[in-house]
Amino acid sequence: MKIRDLKWFFGRNSEFWPTNIKTGMWAWIGHRITGLVLVVYVFMHLSFLSTASISSGDFNALMEVTSNPLFVAMDFVLIIAVIFHAMNGFRVIMFDLGLGVRHQKLVFWIAMAIAAILVIGGLWALWDVIFVPSEGGG
Amino acid sequence: MAGEEITIKVQRFDPTADRVPYWQPYKVVTKPGMTVLDALFEIMNHQDGTLAFRFCCRAGVCGSCAMVIAGKIRLACETQIAQFVRKKELLLSPLPHQKVVKDLAVDYEHFFERIKQVKPYLMGKEPYPEREYIQTPKERVPINDPIDCVLCGSCTSSCSVAWWNTDYLGPAALLKAYRFYADTRDTAKDERLDLIESESGVYRCHTIFNCVEVCPKDLNPTEAIQKMKIGATKRKLFGGRKRRKA
Amino acid sequence: MSSQSIATTKVAGTWAWFFQRLSAVLLIVFLAIHLYASHFMDLGEHESGEALISFDDVTVRLDQLFYIVVDYGMLSMVLVHGLNGLRTVMFDFDMFVKRKKYVDVGLWVVGIATLIWGIVILFPFITGG
């Protein structure tokens, strides 16, 4: 069957989301999305650096731009993606070692709890840069 | 609850006549202990003879009547209507992402083709025993679960990897492979690992656990896949193929 | 899709799978060092005292072989993990499955080209501009 109408995607009991989406499926969707975001990020990271690594002036100018609160807020999104991907990755590796396959939901929530703590830690580290107005461009 | 008139909406599709699937409502008066399959019989016998669905044993043994009932894959013969009616309405649709033959009946051709891939039969070694293979109750423990599989196709059609990658063997075939891999009477362990050790086999499983969520027999195909994955990886990394001699 | 093709397409799934896990674990270690080194470590020679990393800071850091190894190791692991993940995603969604070989060759080319690019990027820091 092809995507012929929106019902295929959004309708109740649609063919695209036919089963109740449970923890494992959410984890997989999240892992996919964050993974693709991170691949894009790595290439962005490299291309930004490549434009800046020519001379010290260029590099310091780039650092000025990226210390803008908007950029740091985007960094925070990046941190969430990395931490989710890493913690869910730990969960997958656990299953690959044969641990906790029978308790997959518990393992997922434990991994997410650790991820939440780490995200809060990241927010704490970035808080000053995002929300405290900087004085004198520093 | 019983004696109430409810609306059963069935997703109908005839590939020779219809362009898109559509929902058709049927009014059914419930009886005590009525299953979804009973309701489908009621519709087919008294209201609409053109409705197509699969059934056979009516007791959850043959695995013919798996379908999406109220948003989740269940066996129609084992599902009580009263349990899943919401606002006097019940939605029925065929197994997701499968080729529909007509209405609720889907094409199992590819499903069984993949089951055959894993050689779903016992491979013994000569000299064969004169009578049956002897197995102690303790030796049977690992296969107590996987032999309950009724091949209803719920797991493979709920697996979001198998939806798109049609080469993937799918949880049903891999569970079947594990059933013989774990069997103490089967002697072709290496050959079984060869069959499932590929990108279309165990390594395509990303532990999404959809198969575990939907299995009407409460089996755990993911655990089976993980065990074979560990076996195959160990063999690849640390050798062990030398056990095979004959 | 025919019954023969599945059994005969024996691609080295084990290695792709195994290195995905190995690189994942290594990446966590590298990432921890990378983040610590670039944002928290005291490099000692902050003449301006400001929080931003300057070109000279990175040069000071990359004087040590350890950090060069970490940065290049991280780059190669990121490429292994990211491109292999991309490959898995593509095949999961049934994209180019019939052209597996071309995909593999293409990803190797992209990976090695990016690795060389990344190695070149850090040269100014290592040589001190």
Image (cartoon, rainbow, N blue to C red):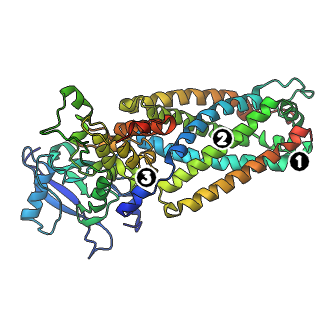
Q: Is residue B128 visible?
A: yes
Q: Are marks 3 and 2 in contact (CB under 8 Å)?
A: no
Disc 3 versus disc 1: distance between alpha carbons? 46 Å
Q: Is residue B95 visible?
A: no
Camera-side mark, 3 or 2: 3
Residue type, mark 1 in image: Ile
Residue C101's place in the image compared with C33, above or below, is below
Asked which secondary structure carries label 3, the reply is loop
Query: Could you classify mark 3 by the number of other residues whose Cα lies within 10 Å: few (under 14), some (14-19), or many (20 or more)?
Result: many
Residue type, mark 2 in image: Met
Residue B97 screen position, x and y as percent:
35, 59
Disc 1 versus disc 2: distance between alpha carbons? 25 Å
Specify the quadrant that holds the N terminus of chain B.
top left
Q: Which mark is residue C77?
A: 2
Residue, disc 3: B200
Q: Which is more toward the observer, B10 or B172?
A: B172
**Which residue is at 44% across, 34% downward?**
A95
How many labels were placed on the picture? 3
A35 lies left or right of B148:
right
Residue, disc 1: A54
Q: Are marks 3 and 1 on the same chain?
A: no
Camera-side mark, 1 or 2: 2
Query: Could you classify mark 2 by the number of other residues whose Cα lies within 10 Å: few (under 14), some (14-19), or many (20 or more)?
Result: many
The image quadrant of residue C54 is: top right
Q: Which is more toward the observer, C6 or A113?
A: C6
Asked which secondary structure carries label 2, the reply is helix
Residue C59 screen position, x and y as percent:
87, 35
